[in-house]
Amino acid sequence: MKWNLFSKKTSDDESLDQKALDDDLHASDKKGRPTPKRRDSENARLHPLAPKDRKAQRKAATQRRRERENAEYDAMRTGDLRHMPKAEQLPWRIYIRDYIDARFNLGEYFMIVIVVLLLAAFATTYFAPQLSLVILILMYVYFFAIIVDSFLMWRKLKKKLIEKFGERSVAKGMRSGYYAWSRALQVRSWRLPKPRTKKHGEWPK
């Protein structure tokens, strides 16, 4: 008599498969639709990353950016530090502004002086060429004086920034230096953010 060693195992497996199939059919009958696969369920839960209307989203984003920029501009014009751009709220930038505003800079009237000298040079070219040459020489002397004054200003200011705020205040590619120079070349009443004091001489602590 021969025994089939795998007959019992095969029979059990077939029973389990039949039971699983019956369960699926029962669940399908109960819900009225086939049981979805796991992959299909995961795909159904996924939402598209791209918006349906990109043009509308870009327009809304542009509008929000303009509103934020307008609010920041108003804050700089009125001196509202809390609503200024984050960069303008840095403590060493506040110190730089107060220091430059307290100091009388030779380049403070740079734009006005240059425009006046150029107009004078052009006007005297036809009537007194020698005088126009003198005006141009004065303009170059003024340029040189601004460079020297700005160099001395930044040398002293940089030392104060390091003492008060550490190396980080002057470490990012001379951004603080450029910030100080650009503010020193502006007319005091035109500067943004607006100076916190009404006149020169009130130095930051």
Image (cartoon, rainbow, N blue to C red):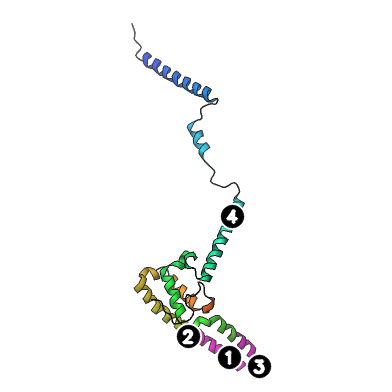
**Does the segment drawn in magenta span residue 123?**
yes
Task: Describe the element under mark 1 as helix, strand or loop.
Answer: helix
Residue 44: percent from left, percent from top? 53, 36
Instruction: Name the residue nearer the viewer: 130 or 119.
Output: 119
Relative height, residue 134 to residue 49 (above, below): below
Separation of marks 4 and 1 at Cα, in angstroms:
56 Å
**Can you identify the residue that label 3 sits on?**
127
Q: Residue at x 62, y 85 (%)?
A: 119
Which mark sits nearer the N-terminus, 3 or 4?
Answer: 4
Name which residue type carries label 2. Ala
**For marks 3 and 1 on the same chain, the one whose residue lies earlier in the sequence:** 3
Q: Which residues are magenta?
A: 117-142
Question: Which element type, helix, strand or loop, lies under badge 3?
Answer: loop
**Foreground residue, 174 or 107?**
107
Q: Position of residue 43 (x, y in %)?
A: 51, 37
63 on left or right of 97? right
As measured in the structure, the alpha-carbon distance from the residue carrying label 3 to the one carrying label 1 is 12 Å
Q: Residues within 10 Å of mark 3 (few under 14, many from 20)?
A: few
First in residue order: circle 4 vs circle 1: 4
Which tag, 2 or 4, sits closer to the chain's start? 4
Residue that numbered label 1 is attached to: 133
Mark 3 or mark 2, earlier in chain? 3
Give coordinates of residue 6: x percent, y percent.
36, 15
The residue indicated by pointer 4 is 60
Kindly identify which numbered label has been placed on residue 145.
2
Residue under the image location 58 percent in, 91 percent down:
133
Q: CA distance from mark 3 to mark 2?
A: 29 Å
